[in-house]
Amino acid sequence: MGQLADLANSMDGGKGLPVEMLADLTHQKTKKTLKRLKKSIRKGWLNAWLDEKTETVYLTAR
């Protein structure tokens, strides 16, 4: 998740980050990355919301 935070800081996370791109950057399959994002959001480890239809994660300001 630290990699995701660093990536979001370098990009405009408010526009959304494609899960496929995050998977490529972390050398994981998209399905696994999606599962980990859902868990991290649900547990409160990541302040974001996930658009499952477009598979895009949007980071919140916190």
Image (spheres, rainbow, N blue to C red):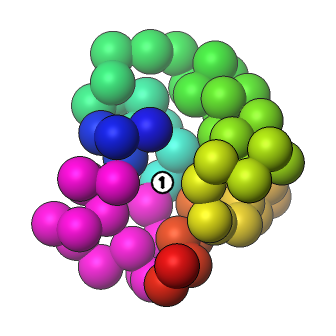
Residue 62 in the image, given as x and y percentages of width and height: 52, 79
Horizontal arrangement in the rendering, residue 3 relative to residue 61 (left or right)? left
Residue 41 position within the rendered picture, expressed as x and y whole percent measured from the top left: 73, 51
The stretch of residues the image draws in magenta is: 5-17
| Residue under numbered circle 1 | 18
Let me know if residue 14 is in the magenta part: yes
Quarter of image, res 17: bottom left
Instruction: Choose top left, top right, bottom left or bottom right for residue 58.
Output: bottom right
Residue 21: give x, y in percent of width and height.
37, 42
Which residue occupies the foreground of this view, 12 or 46?
Answer: 46
Residue 7 in picture, x, y percent from top left: 25, 54
For the point 34% across and 40% down, which residue is it? 2
Q: Is 58 above or below relative to 19?
A: below
Along the viewing direction, whichever of 11 and 2 lies nearer the viewer:
2
Residue for point 49% across, 84% down: 61
Examine the residues drawn in magenta and state their main secondary structure.
helix
Q: Is residue 18 above or below residue 32?
A: below
Find numbered disc 1 in the image and state the secondary structure of the residue it sits on. Answer: strand
Amino acid carrying label 1: it is: Pro
Q: Quadrant of the N terminus?
A: top left
